[in-house]
Image: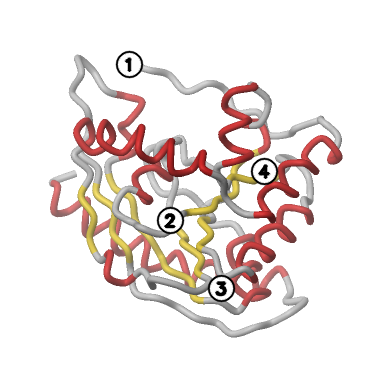
Amino acid sequence: MAEMKPQVYKDDRPAEYFDEFHAAARKGVGWTYSFVRILVSLPTLLVYRVRAIGVENVPKSGPLVLAPNHFSQMDHFFIGLYLRRKVRFMAKSQMFGPPILTYIYKHGGVFPVRRGHHDEEAIRTALTILDQGEMLLVYSEGGRSRSGKLGTVKPGIGRIALESGVTVLPVAIHGSEKVRRWKRFRFPKVTVQFGEPLSFGCEHAASRERQLEVAEQIFAPVREMHRALATRSGR
């Protein structure tokens, strides 16, 4: 059984270290995204037998926030597998460091959120990407749930929804909680369900309570879809 590494909840590197990654993300996505997508799509599909439900709910153009639950570092690949649009996403800053992976992140549409800090730069990058009409993935729980169950929603997704005013699409991922816990090459089957779009309009300088209220409204259908998927699969 593969064990998760201990969580590191604070990144002590200075904010300036991450400036280049935010700058790159605001410029767009390079060829790296398409290359990695081609490289991992077939193995991901074959190994995890990924099934997608409700892909028709994803708009073909225009700014959009995808708001899924999060169990595995593979989740962004599972979500993007059946989508033609490029998925931009916010990742914990600890992922940035190893040279090869950092190059892929920098040129593949990924930008950091500095763990353990109030990272306004990450919010600015997220809003810039949406202003450019792109599709942005923001994990509703703010990070991976390590319990195998859905985690507690964080206000960040609510803030981005309110400050951008763009459509938000709840997404449920079922099965990825077992990606790191396979035994004897018995890989889990993963299902991704795209829910109905939500819109909240623009509210600048909303209180934390209001941000959390909207975050809960976004995550409620994720919980419902995940529960239904679990019932169908018998677990």
According to the picture, the residue beneath numbered tag 2 turns out to be 68
Considering the numbered disc 2 on the image, is that residue within a helix, a strand or a loop? strand
Q: How is the image coloured?
A: secondary structure
Sequence-wise, which precedes: disc 3 or disc 1?
1
Q: CA distance from mark 2 to mark 3?
A: 14 Å
Considering the numbered disc 4 on the image, is that residue within a helix, a strand or a loop? strand
Left or right relative to 186: residue 110: right
- Residue name at image x 46 percent, y 55 percent: 86
Tag on residue 1?
A: 1
Quadrant that contains the C terminus: top left
According to the picture, the residue beneath numbered tag 4 turns out to be 112
Sequence-wise, which precedes: disc 2 or disc 3?
2
Q: Amino acid at mark 2?
A: Pro
Considering the numbered disc 1 on the image, is that residue within a helix, a strand or a loop? loop
Sequence-wise, which precedes: disc 2 or disc 1?
1
Tag on residue 216?
A: none
Q: Can you tell which of label 4 and label 3 is closer to the viewer? A: 4
Tag on residue 214?
A: 3
Quadrant that contains the N terminus: top left
Whether the residues at callouts 2 and 1 have beta carbons within 8 Å, the answer is no
Q: CA distance from mark 2 to mark 1?
A: 25 Å
